[in-house]
């Protein structure tokens, strides 16, 4: 089968890969690029374990073809932390014990990031609906929802302190 | 968040705190390696061809065309496996029937359920392996499918296994693999002395554990006859033993490396792909990786039984239960082995009932062979018994929690199938709910109701091994063979840290392979923190004993004179300053070499677990849809080592129980084909379907464990279906007797009850 | 999955050309949230996939007062329900777009794809029918328009001929009077589910009196059903409880549901009457504040 050469940006780095049209983005990430942090749970768009952010939008990578992302920008769980510095979401997932087996965690972190990027102060209901495409069978979602709300609060705090610091400097 | 813990007066330094789990960073950064994340050079991909029919004779298999497809390296069928012995052989403390196990891995002359593996292929790519499956031709002769226990137990039922016999029916072919009876007292007399008797019949649907990670296996085989299997499993030693049994190779020739595991709940305690991957690796000499699709997981792994249950229970005027009869028939799936015996032993276990008769039937049907699912067997049975108790309480005008407290088992109450209980915490869970802000709050609003129910689970002991190694800097590692599915690594590290006077973060827990640690039974039965925790405790004490010897050597005193207090070693009358474990660790090379504590246990002293759950619902009278408004669960943990993960177990089990209550079920057509083999139509709760799940950890220490630990992993799944049913009753006045209590069923009950069949639907 | 070739044309004519060349073996790809699943399951085996997401006409969403709303066939659901014109003038369509799948799915799935799939349970189709939408179809020879209500002819089958492509949807401007729309569906779970029943309604009101109603039902027949009698009955009536009940009853009589894994026929028929009532109420409430 002929493969195509695809260029894309993954976690901020330019990447080239070869793939068959029938290979999903999930397969490309995991089997071609060795980015196995993105998980497979169903291959039908129903579990969210494979969530990635594609051009700013959270999608199921199992329902995207590798060839479709030519020129696109992809963010995966591997790209969340900066070096050894975890994001607030990663930190609150740890502190709030929001993971048990952890197989759903990459997908939840990505979906939650996408939510908080567009809505920094979501209600519990908004969080629950934004995460409806991500199944977790271990936690009953309680601690996940708390972790997302806690991360949102931390992020708002950081934003306001950095903006007030900025204001301070400007003043 | 405030900890809701009752009776926690531990005086421990590490135990009972909430450190960040040791595997956490790997899991939030995507670095943790699960079974499907492994890859090896030269690896082939394996796929399984499965029967589209529920019951069929396999007349011929032709796979020459598949073998000719470029890239295909091997095709195997049932003929490639040795015929296993048809008897139960011990494996750890479990037992397996090698014949049934082997036939489930690859069908021989008959396919016994839709999804039953018939052939497997290895090819250089996943998509090529999939294409190869389409080139295999199988000739089937269709047989009538037997889908329910009622059908299977009928006199004229088609027989699944012509060789199956049970003790009672002599040499007559049957679908009833086993009848178990438990009896105490005289039920007839007991019912005579009852003032109120309730008799009800229940049905529950087959449901799946629903772990998010599909089954996977990667096997290698060398010319020296040595094999390695990497897989996500709850029981690496079981995978080794079962794979050896299925393939007819020595146990010692296989090493199993447990990967991170993406949920199991009992479903990953047996083998499906592991022996196949190894068989294909043996045929090709190359590593073979296999991963199930979600449809394969649902159709062909091991869900838990659907069931038919009858309960008759009577109580005196004061509410004291005088007698109970329970009849249980559970779907085993295609091969014997449902959890019905466990159901029989759990169904009345929370209560002291003088006269009891329980009959339990293990029945084969054309469905996938069931596997364990969190407190296997108990949830179905509790749905029946706990709704009947609710009805008795209502008829006697007693609060449902008071009813349970009045009849509840305590220390000394004989268990229906065994010796009297030691100290248990059932009553305490009822009291905890009774005093909870939830139960004391008022529930207002139309069509809303509050229900409670309780549950019991034995918990398990079994074998575990542990090593505790002291590092040169005085930190430590804990090595066990127990895969961590819910945070048990954290609790093992904490137990060792407690004994060694270290911080939890200073102990690194390692889950190792089957060659590197002594035999360790499955992560199941809520046994890891209990039994492996006991081994870790002893191994840490062993390390401590050795450390004291070293200190004694330094100080030229007797080891008995060395004491360890507040993180420091002392010796009476020793002029030298006390030293910390860190200082002592530096001196190990000169006092006799490394210190490594070891322990193996076959753990006794298991403490059973009880949970009581309170659920508020609102029912949509027009659609039958049930919304969970509030939920609180109280559970006796004995001692909560890491309370956050105890809560996590309670919340996770409760969520599964709610899913079981409301929407989860295997739906089959008349031909025995599963109609909802995907996560869109097999409806597990999503985030917006649940409220926060409030937890109350009750701590009634288990006298059989050095730290008081009871297992915490399972029992929380048991009460929710009954609690939801009882809540629905209080909301709209109808008693549901079938699971799931899905909208059509609830609506039908409401309309029938109100005597006004819908203007449109039921006319 | 089987093998196929992938094309990503940048213009409509290029896409039509590709479809013409590859004929029945070709399949356009929008969000892929249904097509990829069906291909993986072996239910569809196109040998050419024509990704139409880069074609301007299929990605445009615009509104003007005379022609109404134009919705490119490949516009993802989020862009539909976040669009101010849709939210303000076609709330029933926003309802439907917001209910499809999960956030992840809605970032990919399009209403065009939802329609072309031909699923009786498609959420957006009853909403589109109630609003009187038409489908714009381009083919090798010419372009044509097809009312959405006649677009799906059987489960999984549409009026599209080999070589034809759904370009967009045109929804007429809402009447100047008090009018509104709503779409409701019933699912056992609160999200991530397939409609057991879906009901789309559009209303034109004069105070409490209904001037005109349109009611379309989903998942209760081989294709979407227009509840003609119910709509006709409501014309000129006050929407009081009795009228709503009767309209619900008439709508449920129009339904021709079957038993399947997602629900029984009798349950579905009952739910049609419930949802029709509720959707009418929701639309009437919206019309009041319009
Ligand atoms: S694997 Fe993509 S949604 Fe489940
Ligand atoms: S932590 Fe196991 S599925 Fe979410």
Image (cartoon, coloured by chain):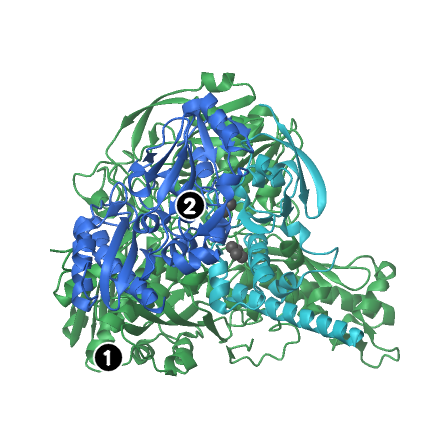
Q: Nearer the viewer, residue C104 or B297?
A: C104
Q: Which mark is residue B186?
A: none
Indicate the colour of chain B. Answer: green
Residue at disc 1, secondary structure = loop
A117 vs C61: above or below: below
Residue at point 20%, 63% (across, down): C244
Q: Which residue is mark 1?
A: B319
Residue at point 37%, 80% (across, down): B439
Indicate the colour of chain A. Answer: cyan
B112 vs C96: above or below: above
The answer to whether residue B374 is visible is no
Q: Nearer the viewer, residue A156 or B621?
A: A156
Identify by letter the chain in blue.
C
B745 sits left or right of B546 in the view: left
Residue at point 49%, 24% (across, down): B75
Q: Nearer the viewer, residue B305 or B575?
A: B305
Residue at disc 2, secondary structure = helix
Q: Nearer the viewer, residue B535 or A117?
A: A117
């Amino acid at each position: 089968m002929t493969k195509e050469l695809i260029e894309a940006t993954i976690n901020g780095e330019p990447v080239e890969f070869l793939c068959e049209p029938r290979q999903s983005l999930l397969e490309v990430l995991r089997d071609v690029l060795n980015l196995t942090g993105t998980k497979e749970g169903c291959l039908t768009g129903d579990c969210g374990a494979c969530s990635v952010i594609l051009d700013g939008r959270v999608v199921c990578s199992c329902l995207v073809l590798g060839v479709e992302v030519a020129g696109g920008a992809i963010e995966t769980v591997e790209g969340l932390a900066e070096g050894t510095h975890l994001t607030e979401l990663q930190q609150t997932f740890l502190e709030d014990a929001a993971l048990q087996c952890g197989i759903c965690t990459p997908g939840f972190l990505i979906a939650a990031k996408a939510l908080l990027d567009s809505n920094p102060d979501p209600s519990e209901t908004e969080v629950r609906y934004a995460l409806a495409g991500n199944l977790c069978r271990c936690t009953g979602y309680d601690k996940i929802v708390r972790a997302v709300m806690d991360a949102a609060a931390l992020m708002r705090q950081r934003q306001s302190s950095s903006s007030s610091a900025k204001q301070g400097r400007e003043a | 968040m405030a900890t809701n813990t009752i009776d926690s007066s531990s005086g421990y330094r590490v135990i009972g705190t909430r450190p960040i789990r040791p595997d956490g960073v790997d899991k939030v950064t995507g670095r943790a390696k699960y079974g499907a994340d492994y890859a090896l050079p030269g690896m082939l991909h394996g796929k399984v061809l499965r029967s589209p029919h529920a019951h069929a004779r396999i007349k011929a298999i032709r796979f020459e065309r598949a073998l000719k497809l470029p890239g295909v390296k091997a095709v195997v069928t049932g003929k490639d496996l040795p015929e296993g012995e048809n008897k139960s052989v011990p494996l750890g403390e479990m037992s397996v029937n090698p014949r049934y196990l082997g036939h489930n891995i690859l069908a021989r002359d008959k396919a016994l359920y839709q999804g039953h593996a018939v052939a497997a292929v290895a090819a250089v790519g996943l998509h090529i392996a999939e294409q190869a499956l389409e080139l295999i031709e199988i000739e089937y002769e269709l047989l009538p499918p037997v889908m329910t226990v009622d059908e299977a137990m009928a006199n004229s039922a088609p027989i699944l296994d012509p060789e199956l016999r049970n003790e009672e029916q002599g040499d007559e072919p049957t679908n009833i693999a086993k009848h178990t009876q438990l009896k105490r007292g005289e039920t007839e007399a007991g019912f005579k002395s009852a003032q109120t008797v309730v008799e009800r019949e229940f049905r529950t649907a087959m449901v799946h554990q629903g772990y998010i990670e599909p089954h996977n296996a990667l096997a290698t085989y060398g010319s020296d006859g040595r094999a390695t299997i990497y897989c996500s499993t709850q029981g690496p030693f079981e995978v080794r033993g079962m794979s050896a049994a299925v393939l007819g190779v020595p146990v010692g020739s296989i090493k199993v490396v447990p990967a991170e595991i993406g949920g199991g709940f009992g479903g990953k305690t047996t083998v499906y792909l592991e022996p196949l991957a190894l068989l294909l690796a043996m045929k090709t000499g190359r590593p073979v990786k296999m991963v199930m699709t979600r449809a394969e997981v649902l159709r062909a792994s091991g869900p838990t039984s659907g069931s038919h249950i009858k309960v008759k229970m009577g109580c005196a005027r004061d509410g004291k239960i005088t007698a109970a009869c329970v009849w249980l028939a559970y779907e085993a799936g295609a091969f014997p082995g449902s959890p019905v015996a466990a159901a029989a032993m759990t169904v009345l276990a929370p209560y002291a009932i003088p006269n009891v008769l329980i009959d339990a039937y293990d029945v084969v049907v054309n469905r996938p062979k069931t596997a364990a699912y969190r407190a296997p067997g108990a949830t179905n049975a509790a749905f029946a018994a706990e709704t009947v108790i609710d009805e008795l309480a209502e008829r006697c005008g007693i609060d449902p929690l008071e009813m349970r407290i009045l009849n509840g088992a305590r220390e000394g109450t004989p268990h229906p199938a065994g010796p009297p209980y030691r100290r248990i915490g059932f009553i305490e869970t009822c009291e905890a709910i009774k005093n909870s802000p939830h139960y004391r709050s008022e529930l207002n609003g139309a069509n809303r109701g509050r229900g409670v129910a309780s549950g019991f689970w034995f918990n398990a002991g079994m074998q575990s091994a542990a090593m505790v190694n002291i590092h040169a800097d005085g930190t430590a590692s804990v090595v066990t063979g127990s895969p961590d599915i819910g945070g048990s690594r954290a609790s093992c590290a904490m137990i060792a840290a407690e004994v060694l006077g270290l911080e939890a973060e200073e102990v690194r827990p390692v889950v190792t392979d089957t060659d590197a640690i002594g035999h360790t039974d499955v992560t199941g039965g809520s046994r890891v923190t209990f039994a492996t925790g006991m081994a870790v405790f002893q191994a840490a004490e062993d390390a401590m004993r050795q450390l004291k010897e070293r200190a004694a050597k330094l100080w030229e005193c007797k080891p008995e004179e060395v004491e360890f207090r507040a993180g420091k070693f002392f010796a009476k009358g020793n002029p030298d300053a006390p030293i910390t474990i860190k200082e002592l660790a530096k001196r190990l090379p000169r006092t006799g070499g490394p210190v490594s504590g070891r322990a193996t246990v076959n753990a006794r002293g298991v403490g059973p677990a009880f949970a009581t759950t309170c659920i508020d619902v609102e029912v949509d009278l027009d659609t039958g849809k049930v919304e969970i408004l509030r939920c609180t669960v109280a559970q006796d943990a004995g001692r909560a080592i890491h309370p956050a993960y105890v809560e996590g177990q309670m919340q996770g089990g409760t969520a599964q129980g709610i899913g079981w209550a409301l929407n989860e079920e295997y739906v089959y057509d008349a031909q025995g084909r599963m109609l909802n083999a995907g996560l869109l139509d097999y409806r597990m709760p999503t985030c917006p379907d649940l409220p926060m799940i409030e937890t109350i950890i009750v701590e009634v220490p288990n006298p059989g464990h050095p730290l008081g630990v009871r297992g915490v992993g399972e029992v929380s799944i048991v009460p929710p279906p009954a609690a939801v049913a009882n809540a629905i009753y209080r909301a709209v006045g109808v008693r549901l007797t079938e699971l799931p209590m899905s909208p059509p069923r609830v609506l039908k009950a409401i309309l029938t009850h109100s005597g006004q069949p819908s203007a449109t639907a039921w006319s | 999955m089987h093998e196929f070739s992938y094309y990503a044309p940048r213009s409509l004519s290029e896409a039509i050309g590709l479809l013409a060349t590859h004929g029945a073996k070709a399949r356009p790809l929008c969000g892929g949230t249904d097509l990829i699943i069906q291909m993986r399951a072996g239910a569809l085996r196109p040998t050419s996939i024509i990704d139409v997401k880069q074609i301007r006409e299929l990605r445009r969403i615009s509104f003007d007062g005379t022609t109404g709303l134009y919705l490119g066939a490949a516009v993802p659901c989020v862009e539909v329900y976040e669009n101010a014109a849709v939210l303000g003038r076609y709330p029933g369509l926003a309802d439907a777009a917001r209910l499809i799948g999960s956030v992840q799915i809605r970032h990919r799935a399009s209403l065009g794809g939802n329609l072309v799939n031909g699923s009786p349970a498609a959420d957006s189709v009853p909403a589109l029918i109630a609003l009187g939408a038409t489908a714009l179809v381009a083919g090798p020879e010419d372009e044509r328009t097809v009312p959405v209500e006649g677009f799906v002819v059987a489960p999984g089958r549409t009026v599209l001929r080999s070589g034809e492509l759904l370009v967009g949807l045109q929804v007429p401007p809402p009447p100047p009077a008090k009018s509104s729309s709503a779409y409701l569906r019933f699912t056992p779970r609160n999200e991530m589910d397939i409609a057991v029943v879906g009901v789309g309604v559009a209303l034109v009101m004069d105070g409490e009196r209904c001037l005109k109603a349109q009611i379309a039902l989903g998942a209760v027949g081989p294709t979407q059903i227009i509840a003609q009698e119910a709509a006709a009955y409501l014309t000129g009536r006050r929407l009081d409880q009795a009228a709503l009940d009767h309209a619900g009853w008439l709508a449920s009589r129009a339904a021709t549901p079957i038993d399947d894994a997602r629900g029984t026929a009798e349950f579905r028929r009952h739910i049609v009457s419930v949802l029709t009532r509720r959707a009418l109420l929701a639309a009437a409430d919206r019309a009041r504040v319009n």
